[in-house]
Amino acid sequence: MFISGGFTVLSLKFVLFVAIGIGLRVRAQPTDPTTALAYSLAVPRINETREEREDRSERIVAERRSLPDSPGVYLFRDRDDEVIYVGKAISIRKRVASHFSAGNAEMTRLVDRIEFLVTENESDALITEQSFIKRYRPRFNIKLRDDKSYPYIAVSLDEDYPRVYFTRERHRTGRAYFGPFSSARRVRDTLDLLGKLFQYRTCEGKEPGRRSGSPCLDYFIKRCGAPCVDYIDQDDYRKNIDAVIDFLSGRYARIEKDLESQMEAAAANQDFEAAAAFRDRLQSIPVRCSSASGSPGSKVGTADLIGVAAEGTDANAQVFQVRDGILAERQSFYLENPAERGLAEVTAEFIEQFYSASPSIPKRIVLGPYMAGQAQEIEDFLATRRSQSKVEVRIAERGDSRRLRELAEQNAKLALDQDRLRSEHSQQRRVESLSSLAEALSMDELPIRIEGFDISNLGGSHTVASMVVFEGGKPKKSDYRRFKVKGEFGHEGPDDFASMEEILGRRLAQHREQADLSPHDGSRDESFAALPSLILIDGGKGQLAAGIRALGEFIEAGVTVISLAKKLEEVFTPGSSDPIDLPPDSQESMLLQRVRDEAHRFAIGHHRGRRDRAMTESALDGTARGRACPQASPDQALRHS
């Protein structure tokens, strides 16, 4: 049987094996689309009974009839009381009805309860909707990929000598933020250019300098004016920072005018070295914006032009940021569209999310004709974000604005196509790696779920372990787990063999406990309840022998256990003293190396955290806390006893 998009053949033997395995233990449902179909063939879904379905349907119909014909926000909740969708509407009743008549069937069949909040107007509804989306993060709403970690450039205006630096947070007061940028590389390239144009310090802390009292390398390569040794006074340094802010704000004409006047003044004073430096800075500005020469942006002025493409559950938004007639930035954002909503809805939600995260909003936003019906609503929303200043939303149907907006839409379609090709290629490589690995290890099934284990210690102190999970060939970080080695086998000092045996034994014990719990039990740990296909131990034959002693029940259930020795990347299997023939540069070996390296990274991070906390603790901490805080628990009061 061929799996669409999977580029592999799934044998009936594999399906039967998974079905048998399900009877023994609960397997984790794969999230990778390649393996999802195979899983669905063997694992029945937990469905509601016919009576429950009819009762829910009648209740939803009654709730829909009671909805108000007013503007506001509505929330769909599922059986677990989780918010799966947040929407806004001029009429809540009519908008909700459209979901059930011609909406996404996958979403509506999950709706168990409808909540609503009436607002005075559409603008208030839009603001409230964004607040609820940020709070609940519903699965069927439009989402920016990795929207929690988009990078910004920050300027620490609260310091005497401000810094210009890369950041992913924007909550500190007294600091100016510029972004969000679509990639970290774009931020670093911009910072590199800013360092050449406007010298500023990169040292950390409120005060510039270092303990030696001499300027650092940045001064000698002309990246900093060295305020730490008073080579530049505070006023001149602030002028550089003001120029950085002008540059990031797109005020290029002002920068060029200032640099020209400074160059001419230096030349008039026969300070030709300074004049040459100003000349070089002046020439660097057109270099940055040369890609916009001859483009229609020169007649647009200052505006953001937004083009969006949507296909299926994927979408892409392009933001062309034109400043002073120059195409200053072209940002590309990939969106998740699980409800497969239309182009206008995707564009509206992107605008709401993007400008909610953007510290600055231009006076004009240019959109396509499909947004004509929502222009006023978006204007009102953006005005609240821009401190009530007027924001013009222009529907570009002719002229230079239309041509540049169409270029943005064309780029969005191309980006979406390229992303799909990359995704298919990556998926194909993962499937090939899993298939080759299963063949190399003589497995009867693809290793859908791989768990990697590693031990970390330093001189026997603070010994910890990590468990990482790869599902469908990709990391599943929500299933990562950490362990503190308790020394259950009575060993003293660093003993990796005993530590590994203890941790794997505890993993098996957790599986026994969690697998017996109902999937609806709130205390159930899905990671421990899952039965892995393959367990990878970081180490050689000794660590593998310890794992076999601890995992006998797993092995009987069909779980494959192997170890990977780091020095020569040798793979050891039970019952053989020699490693299997697996070239270190093969796809399957590199997959195992990624799992092993991730387990090592995760264990090292846990170990460092425990060691750092131990170094800052005092034997008197517990006593002081116990006396000062009568409400402290016995465990807290006796932590160091």
Image (tube, rainbow, N blue to C red):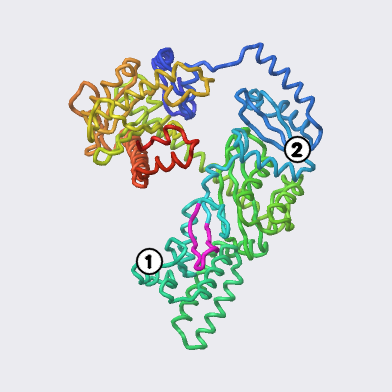
Q: Does the magenta stretch include residue 160?
A: yes
The amino acid marked with disc number 2 is Gly
| Residue at image point 77% right, 49% down | 376
| Residue at image point 61% right, 33% down | 140
- Mark 1–mark 2 contact, CB under 8 Å? no
**Residue where numbered disc 1 is placed:** 210
The amino acid marked with disc number 1 is Arg
Q: In which quadrant will I find the N terminus? A: top left
Residue 314 placement: quadrant: top right
Which of the pair 450/498 is nearer the observer? 498
Q: Is residue 105 left or right of residue 376?
A: left
**Whole-number angstrom distance, CA of label 1 to CA of label 2:** 56 Å
Residue 295, x across and y down, in percent: 61, 62
Q: Is residue 264 magenta?
A: no
Q: Is residue 246 left or right of residue 491?
A: right
Q: What element carries label 1?
A: loop
Question: Which numbered marker is on residue 11?
Answer: none
**Residue where numbered disc 2 is placed:** 72
Q: In this view, does 615 lie to the left or right of 576?
A: right
Segment colored magenta = 153-167
Residue 174 placement: quadrant: bottom right
Residue 526, x across and y down, in percent: 46, 25
Q: Is mark 2 on a helix, strand or loop?
A: strand
Q: How crowded is mark 2: few (under 14 residues within 10 Å), some or many (20 or more)?
A: many
| Residue at image point 60% right, 24% down | 80
Count every numbered label the image shows and give the total: 2
Above or below residue 87? Residue 275 is: below
Above or below residue 112? Residue 589 is: below
Residue 134, x across and y down, in percent: 61, 41
Extreme residue toward the left, this view: 577
Extreme residue toward the right, this view: 69
